[in-house]
Image: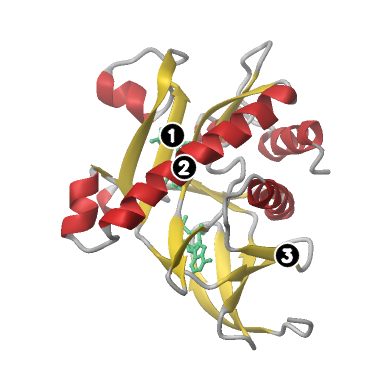
Amino acid sequence: MENIEKGDLITTGKAKSLYSTNQADFLVMHYRDDTSAFDGKKIESLEGKGTINNKFNAFIMEYLEKEGIPTHFERLLSETDSLVKKLEMAPVECVVRNVAAGSICKRLGLKEGLDLNPPTFEFFYKDDDLGDPMINEYHIKSFGWATTEQVDQMQEKTFQVNDALKKLFSDAGMILIDYKLEFGSFKGELLLGDEFTPDGCRVWDVETREKLDKDRFRQGLGDVVESYQIMAKRLGVI
Ligand code: ADP
Ligand code: TMP
Ligand code: ASP
């Protein structure tokens, strides 16, 4: 693991690029400045976003490992690159919501800010062309995207992340509103993959309820990267 060499580009997502390495089980995850919303319909490059997200993700993944949640994260390689285990990803997004915001408000006519007690869970199918439709666990099993055991584990681990991170954010004066996780398998074990950054969660200031996450970009509120940096400073990431 000492001499990792970055190889060929293998995937370009909306915000990150994956490169092979000289070790078959590992990939380099490169965080770009590209910022997208509404399934890629709104895209902008925001200077410094890749760097802050790379550091933010490393901090959270290491914290989750300590809390007993296994992840793909190995180590930071540079300002914008991290080394990760190469996973077979389930094409599924796992969302936990502590407070109503975003699509659940539109779908169910809820007022933004409503406390969801107990927190609720939703699966989405990861497909931009279809607009990431909401699905249930039967779809995942019927289409062979994951086994019953993996589906159960995805739900369980996503709630475990909630227990760990709700407190981390609240100790730093912030409310974890909701977040999206992706999982994949590595040699038969289900690991948390992808990222946990302000791009994939909602976080509000506890006093003012100001939005600090990617809703600033979605809603044109401005100071997107600056706000990600405020979150990172409060958590002790930077
Ligand atoms: P998206 O366009 O889906 O938002 P990103 O820009 O976030 O994509 O790129 C990351 C891509 O890499 C996603 O398709 C994600 O599912 C995938 N991915 C994340 N972690 C891993 C991993 N450890 N191994 C393989 N693929 C991964
Ligand atoms: P939603 O309210 O749009 O369904 O999003 C719920 C949470 O999941 C929110 O924190 C944003 C995150 N999310 C992503 O990161 N990527 C996605 O493709 C979607 C649909 C949601
Ligand atoms: N992640 C999706 C996109 O980039 C959805 C969103 O965040 O609004 O388009």
Reply above or below: 82 against 42.
below
Residue at x 60% of width, y 28% of height: 166
Q: CA distance from mark 3 to mark 2?
A: 22 Å
Secondary structure under the numbered disc 2 in the rendered image: helix
Mark 1 sits on what residue? Answer: 96
Secondary structure under the numbered disc 1 in the rendered image: strand
Reply above or below: 37 against 165.
below
Q: CA distance from mark 3 to mark 1?
A: 26 Å
Frontmost residue, 47 versus 181? 181
Percent x, y of residue 21: 63, 83
Badge 2 crowding class, 10 Å Cα cut-off, few under 14, some 14 to 19, many 20 or more, is: many
Mark 2 sits on what residue? Answer: 158
Instruction: Evaluate whether residue 39 shows in this view.
Output: no
Q: Upstream in the sequence, badge 3 or badge 1?
A: 3
Frontmost residue, 138 versus 211? 138
Q: Upstream in the sequence, badge 1 or badge 2?
A: 1
Q: Is mark 1 within 8 Å of ligand 2?
A: no
Residue at x 47% of width, y 14% of height: 113
Q: Three-letter amino acid code at disc 1?
A: Val
Q: Upstream in the sequence, badge 3 or badge 2?
A: 3
Instruction: Evaluate whether residue 151 shows in this view.
Output: yes
Quadrant occupied by the C terminus:
top right
Percent x, y of residue 46: 66, 48
Percent x, y of residue 163: 56, 32
Residue at x 55% of width, y 57% of height: 15
Percent x, y of residue 6: 68, 82
Marks 1 and 2 close (CB-CB < 8 Å) = yes
